[in-house]
Image (cartoon, rainbow, N blue to C red):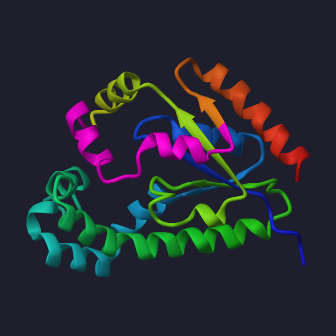
Amino acid sequence: MAKPKVVIGILGGICSGKSTVAGLFERLGCGVVDADAIAHELLEDSDIKKEIRKAFGGEVFDEAGRVDTEGLAQEVFGDKEAVARINGIIHPPVLAGCAELMAELNKRSDIKAIVLDIPLLAEAGWLRQCDKLIFVDCEDRKRADRAAEKGRFSKKQLKKRENFQIFLDKKKKIADYIVDNNSGLSATAEQVDRIFTIIIDKK
């Protein structure tokens, strides 16, 4: 039986650049488990859509019958009970999909390590799945600017969402490595290259 691959978990705030860092690890030969991609696929599932419609009504769907993710977010964030309801619908199948993909990647000889790009990694209780944790550090102002540039949400909305997550300073303290993502991509890539070399050498 092949030795299990090193599992690297990515922590950080909203729009801190976690997916960018995960992509840099992928460039180095890692397999990435992208929970957001899995979640978006699940939002096309008829059973999931039925549960969402039952919990939140038809207002969170567009004219084509697809889940309006931004409309759903507006409906959910700011209400702890609503957050719990949507998490109860989405999280179990998303995490099941993540576990399935991890198992597939672990069998592949071309994959050097597995990177978990799961937004609520700590909140979902998946820290124990990780051999190493990396915190992506990014200033609040830069994160808010990135969110606005992507047309996702305002600084106020960003803060509202993060109120339902574990405090960033706690995530930073438990990380094995910190990537400073306040500069350009090349600077971030250099840090990722260095950290990856250390992790693989210690394997």
Asked if residue 65 can be seen in this view, the reply is no
Q: Describe residue 12's horizontal placement relative to residue 195 as left or right.
A: left
Coordinates of residue 1 in the picture (x, y in percent): 90, 78
Q: Residue drawn at (47%, 65%), measured in percent from left and top?
A: 124
Q: How many labels does the image show?
A: 0
Task: Return the residue nearer the eye: 142 or 135.
Answer: 135
Q: Which of 130 and 21 is in front in this view?
A: 130
Of residues 65 and 96, the one drawn nearer to the viewer in this rendering: 96
Which residue is painted at 72% across and 65% down in the image?
105
Horizontal relation, residue 170 to residue 24: left or right: left
Q: Is 166 situated above or below 129?
A: above
Residue 143, picture quadrant:
top left
Residue 67 occupies quadrant: bottom left
Taking the image as drawn, is residue 3 in sight? yes
Examine the structure image and report whether residue 85 is included in the region drawn in magenta.
no
In this rendering, the answer to whether 66 lies above or below 194 is below
Q: Where is residue 177 in the image (x, y as percent from the top left)?
A: 68, 39
In x, y percent, where is residue 194?
Answer: 79, 31
Q: Position of residue 61 (x, y in %)?
A: 16, 62
Q: Which residue is drawn at 45% across and 56% down?
A: 120
The prevailing secondary structure element of the residues shown in magenta is: helix
Q: Which residue is drawn at 41% across and 51% down?
A: 166
Q: Is residue 146 above or below residue 58?
A: above
Magenta span of residues: 153-177
59 on left or right of 43: left
Residue 166 colored magenta? yes
Is residue 131 positioned above or below 189 on the image?
A: below
- Place residue 20 in its image quadrant: top right
